[in-house]
Amino acid sequence: MIVGVSCDSQQANKAFKEKFDFPFDLLCDESGTMSATYGALAPGKRGFPSRISYWIGPKGTIVKAYPEVSPGSHASDVLEDLNA
């Protein structure tokens, strides 16, 4: 399962999903609590989230962190790791 997390409002997330045809569920974390817990709030950027991705295994543990996600290559990076 793939989900995204955004600190934006439900309305902003809905607009993003529609504009970019985003195929995954997008969770709202307006308080930033989840983002802070996972270390996804960029330091020095006044609480704005950074692009970070986690591969979470079936037991709920983090298998791998991708701290600097590039939208153009991230899917192939993850697929490469899954196939390894």
Image (spheres, rainbow, N blue to C red):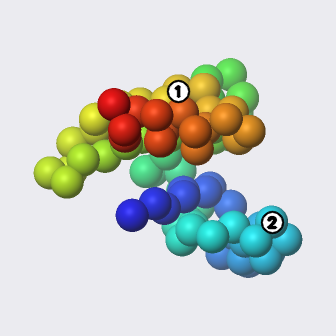
Which numbered disc, 2 or 1, marks the residue that appears first in the sequence? 2
Which residue is located at x 57 percent, y 68 percent?
24
Q: Position of residue 71 (x, y in %)?
A: 71, 41
How many numbered callouts?
2
Say which of 38 and 59 sits in front.
Answer: 59
Please tell me whether mark 1 sits on a helix, a strand or a loop. Answer: loop
Q: Nearer the viewer, mark 2 or mark 1?
A: 2
Which residue is located at x 72 percent, y 29 percent?
45
The correct choice, above or below, for 23 with respect to 72 in the image is below
Q: Which residue is mark 1?
A: 67
Task: Look at the numbered discs 2 and 1 and tell me whether their residues touch, using CB distance below 8 Å.
Answer: no
- State left or right for residue 3 relative to residue 59: right
Which residue is located at x 24 percent, y 47 percent?
57
In terms of image quadrants, where is residue 21? bottom right
Say which of 74 and 30 sits in front.
Answer: 74
Amino acid of disc 1: Pro
Q: Position of residue 13 (x, y in %)?
A: 70, 69
Q: Is residue 47 visible?
A: no
- State left or right for residue 34 relative to residue 47: left
Please tell me whether mark 2 sits on a helix, a strand or a loop. Answer: helix
Say which of 16 and 41 sits in front.
Answer: 16
Q: Which residue is mark 2?
A: 20
The correct choice, above or below, for 31 with respect to 84 in the image is below
The correct choice, above or below, for 41 with respect to 16 in the image is above
In terms of image quadrants, where is residue 77? top right
Density class for disc 1 (Cα within 10 Å; few <14, some 14-19, many ≥20) is few
Quote the CA–CA distance across marks 2 and 1. Answer: 23 Å
Which residue is located at x 39 percent, y 64 percent?
1
